[in-house]
Amino acid sequence: MAPPLQATLGMFTGTYSGTDPGMLYDADIGAMYSSIPRTDYISPSFSMFGWMFFTFILLIIGIIRFQKREVK
């Protein structure tokens, strides 16, 4: 993946606190720095809880929808 694309993807997902893709790119090695500062917007445990809750809700919705009709 091209370094400017890596920087843009990192900014879009919010994992790393890169504001300028040019500052995150090391021209000597032709890639991003390995020590980009990470953002701590959400704790990992809260994130895991959110994804598990989202999955549980989707499972419940699926069970309710499939009880209403027969699967042939």
Image (spheres, helix red, strand yellow):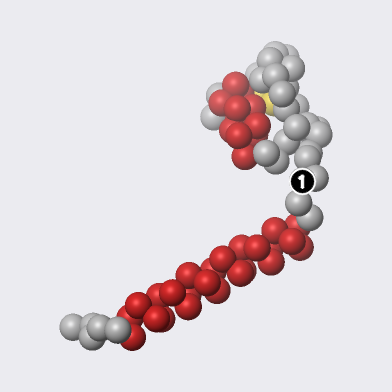
Which amino acid does the dot numbered 1 rest on?
Answer: Tyr
Question: Going 56% across and 26% down the picture, which residue do you hit?
Answer: 5
Question: Going 18% across and 83% down the picture, which residue do you hit?
Answer: 72
What residue does disc 1 label? 41
Question: Going 61% across and 69% down the picture, which residue do you hit?
Answer: 53
Q: Is residue 63 left or right of residue 24?
A: left
Residue 25 seen: no
Residue 34 image point, x, y percent: 76, 32
The quarter of the image holding the N terminus is top right
Q: Nearer the viewer, residue 51 or 27?
A: 51
Above or below residue 39? Residue 44 is: below
Residue 40 image point, x, y percent: 80, 45
Above or below residue 34? Residue 24 is: above
Residue 37 seen: yes
> Which image quarter: residue 55?
bottom right
Count of numbered labels shown in the rendering? 1
Residue 70 image point, x, y percent: 23, 85
Residue 50 image point, x, y percent: 65, 63
